[in-house]
Amino acid sequence: MITGGTNGLTKTGSGTLTLSGTNTYAGGTVVNNGSLVLASTTALKSNTSLGITGSGSVQVAGTGGVLQVSSLNITGSGKLDLDKHDLIWHNGDVSTVTSWLDAGYSGGTWNDTSNLPAITSSTYTTGYGFGVLSGAVYLGIYGQGAQFDEVTVSPSDVLVKYTLLGDTTLKGYVDATDFAQLDAAYLMGLYATGGATWINGDCNYDGQITNADYAAMNASFQLSQSGGGQATQVPPTGVNTITPVSQTRSNSPLSAGSTNAPYAVLAVALVFAEPDATATDSSAISITPTPEPGTLGIASVGLLAFLRKRKRTSITTLRMRPMTRA
């Protein structure tokens, strides 16, 4: 355990250094070379600055917990392996984190190391990955004073969660609100123009709403339902028999009226929760299935069945605001 230091911690050798316990040293943490292994999220002093440069890497081990940093800089061939942990970067930059996540997923898996610097997961489970939201968006969904991993969120925070692909609002599972987010993004034309982000349903960080995003979200919906509606860091018991759809970037973007879309597009209300969200009934969601000729995707079928089965549900703690199109 490191306590009472004032100059921070700098690692320069090529070997591996493991930190355990709850460390309280002052100053930042810099890894210029080799690997720093954190036995738990508390092994790194809470809210310290973290720099990973050169060929350095940081791996977060253990189970549970959230890594909190006051600043984060990953350059060169640096890598932050979050394993299956969450991250809060206070006063962070969401676009920078998105670029690191994109790099970590560039090979179609979350442990890619060919496009560094990156944020990765060495032990990810197929169908799971990292979602990212700004604190401002998170508070817009859940209201002022909302917590993320028992930490009160500030608008300037950047929040990263290990969760099911398609969990647009970082709640730990996929439900009707996520389909609404994705379908609204599709109707806004983000399948062609780019600019889609995690909140829109862009699961693979390619900036577009594609067939792969629909397929991944539907697989996650099935996982959530089979696991009792709540995903954990490891798929719930009995869920592993369902094979999640593997995300790739080989799928062509969807086009308006396209017959190659695997799921029918739903005409939905754009989910944009406000701080004073008070809706408590699933009727707040306006859904009209509009199947492609001869097809009705299992995503829309599952969504409608879900809403019929659960008239009142916790997913509608968000107030829906209708989408307008220019």
Image (cartoon, grey):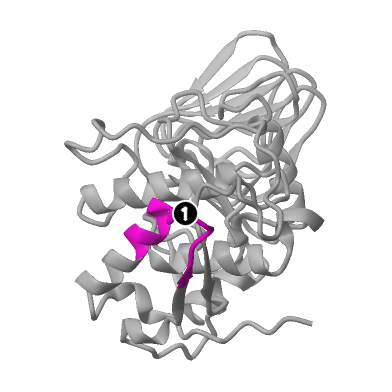
In the image shown, does 264 or 23 lie closer to the viewer?
264
Q: Position of residue 98 (x, y in %)?
A: 70, 47
Question: The N terminus lies in which quarter of the figure?
Answer: top left
Q: Residue furthest top?
A: 15
Please provide percent x and percent y for residue 66.
46, 48
Is 126 left, or right, of 136 in this rendering?
left
Q: Quadrant of residue 80?
A: top right
Which residue appears at 81% of the width and 57% of the height? 193
Indicate the position of residue 86 as horizontal and vertical percent values: 48, 46
**Quarter of the image containing the C terminus?**
bottom right
Q: Which residues are magenta?
A: 289-303
Callout 1 amino acid: Gly
Which secondary structure lies at badge 1?
loop
In the image, residue 203 sits, relative to residue 105, either above or below, namely: below
Question: In percent of the image, x 24 and y 73: which residue is there?
Answer: 308
Vertical order, 107 against 216 (above or below): above
x, y (%) of residue 277? 45, 88
Question: Which residue bears the numbered disc 1?
Answer: 294
Which residue extends farthest left? 238
